[in-house]
Image: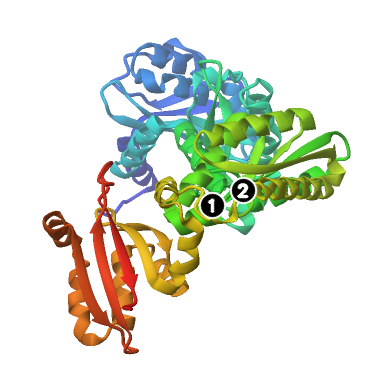
Amino acid sequence: MKLQDKDELYGFIENTLMNDFVQLFRVNIQSGDFEFLKVSPNIHIDPNEYSNIFDYAKQVVKSGYISADYADGYLRFIDPDTIRRRVFGGERRIVYRYKRTDGKWDVFSITSPKDCSPENPWTVFSIMNSDAGSTALTEAMTTLSVIYYKILKINLTTDSFEIIKADSSEHIENNVQKITDWFRLFAELGNVHEEDLDMYRSFTDAEKIKEHFRTNKTRLSCRYRRKHKTGGYRWAQMDIVEGEGYSDDDVRLLLFVKDVHEEHMSELRHREELVDNFNRDALTLLYNRNTFNDDVDKIRKETDGSVTCLYVDANGLHEINNALGHQKGDDMLCSVADALKSCFPDDRVYRIGGDEFVMLSRRLNSAEVAKRAKAAGKKLARLNYAISAGVDSGAGADISKIVDNAEQAMRKNKEEYYKGFDKDRKKRVMNEELEKMLTEKRDEEYFLGIIGEMYAGVYFIDIKRDSLRYIFIPEYFKGLLEEASFSVSRALTMYANKFVESKYIDGFCDLLNFDELSKTLDKKGNVDYLYKKKNGAEMELKILKTNADSDGKEETIWIFKRPE
């Protein structure tokens, strides 16, 4: 269509534009005077009845045209002081999207010419139906508002903000116009935990935010404790991202705040567990040597106050490991740890070596520590365990010397312990069943003196648990046991493959089928097997069933003997 004259052209433009708008006004934002160009027939309020656009806008809200969820935001948007500050501050177009009570969306825009000023305060207020894209964006923001406490559009160039959602419990004054004032008041009114105030103020510093987005263009995040409506504080996360239309000269951003309390507390617990696991001995759960060294360094730097050190050694651990196996040794170490923790519940207890423990106290004197150490010894004695202990105290700066003195006192106590303890009996101090057997024979010294010549090995083997304790074991077989992770059947299989002549290996390994061996022993009482080693030496293996078939055990005696 070809337009013939200017009037026809203007009419065409006017009609085309009018079709897109629900309402259209020319407004003086200083006085509130307005001229309406188009009024929606769906808004049953006559603008002719009002001389001030802002009074008319408030009446639109009262009429119920706007959804209740968006009424407060609408009123904040058309606040005259807010509009004047933003427009005169240089914003050419200000937009607010809201939902009507009929479920549809409108876009309210305030558009200003370049020369708009307090002397020439005329702008255009326009309301049009939201297009599909804008509706989808607004719906997405509405969905996000379920997740977030607060959603703000902020402009750091004009120091302004628009509230998409804000929690009413935050008690921010309604007349706050600047985002910098909003940040400041939010903290001053007690909404941020006092321990997080410095971090919060640094994070919300407008110049720092501007600099970040000039250089990085990435999301800014921080976590702080935010006052909850219940009166306590919960962890919240604030995120700031680039907004639509962002530029270095027009810093438009979106600010989101959400509750992350449960998530943050879970992370803290997990972090504490990781740190605690790193600082603790895996077996006894006492603090480990690394933690001990760190604590000693800290104490050394403290010049005030005294410290008392208890140094403890578990007596007979080596013998228990050899006679009963490493599991029994681990049981002893855990028992010592439990006894120390129960007697020193409020102090730091460490396992600093295989069988060595240390306790450091800033509150107990030497006499009290010695008394409690004696109580721990009595607890362990009831389990047939024994410890040696040494105590020393002094100024914290001398902590290394204090620990050394306590260790020396422990070693002296250990020497005294073993002086009155029979050397041969010490080797089997925790093996009560073996002790009983050897005592009944009444020839312990003779037996130990000749056993190395008569036997290649004598073992108690629990064929149900695949474990052993031994009377006599050669050094090479100890190595096989350790390599086999103390599984007797695996260690004996390794022994057969390494030392037994090939034609005897199958017969030897048949004995390692412990289920079948158990049936054979039940019928015959014993099993004898003759074989040769690869070096040509003959060997006799006798397997006997014992009476120790209780608590899930099925112990047998395996005697490896050189033929006479």
Residue at figure coordinates x 41%, y 52% from the top left: 441
Q: Is residue 257 visible?
A: no
Residue at figure coordinates x 59%, y 51% from the top left: 422
Image position, residue 461 (x, y; %): 31, 58
Pick the residue in front: 81 or 194.
194
Contact, mark 2 vs mark 1 (Cβ under 8 Å):
yes
Going by the numbered disc 2, the residue's amino acid type is Phe
Label 2 secondary element: loop
Mark 1: give few (<14), some (14-19) or many (20+) Cα within 10 Å. Answer: some
Going by the numbered disc 1, the residue's amino acid type is Arg
Mark 2: give few (<14), some (14-19) or many (20+) Cα within 10 Å. Answer: few
- With respect to residue 494, does 57 lie above or below? above
What is the C-alpha distance between the residues marked 2 and 1?
7 Å
Image position, residue 31 (x, y; %): 60, 20
Disc 1 marks which residue? Answer: 425
Image position, residue 33 (x, y; %): 54, 20
Residue at figure coordinates x 56%, y 44% from the top left: 276
Disc 2 marks which residue? Answer: 421
Pick the residue in front: 396 or 419.
419
* Coloring applied to the structure: rainbow
**Residue 483 appears in which quarter of the rendering?**
bottom left
Pick the residue in front: 256 or 127.
256
Label 1 secondary element: helix
- With respect to residue 330, does 102 lie above or below? above
- With respect to residue 472, does 502 lie above or below? below
Of the 4 image quadrants, the one containing the C terminus is bottom left
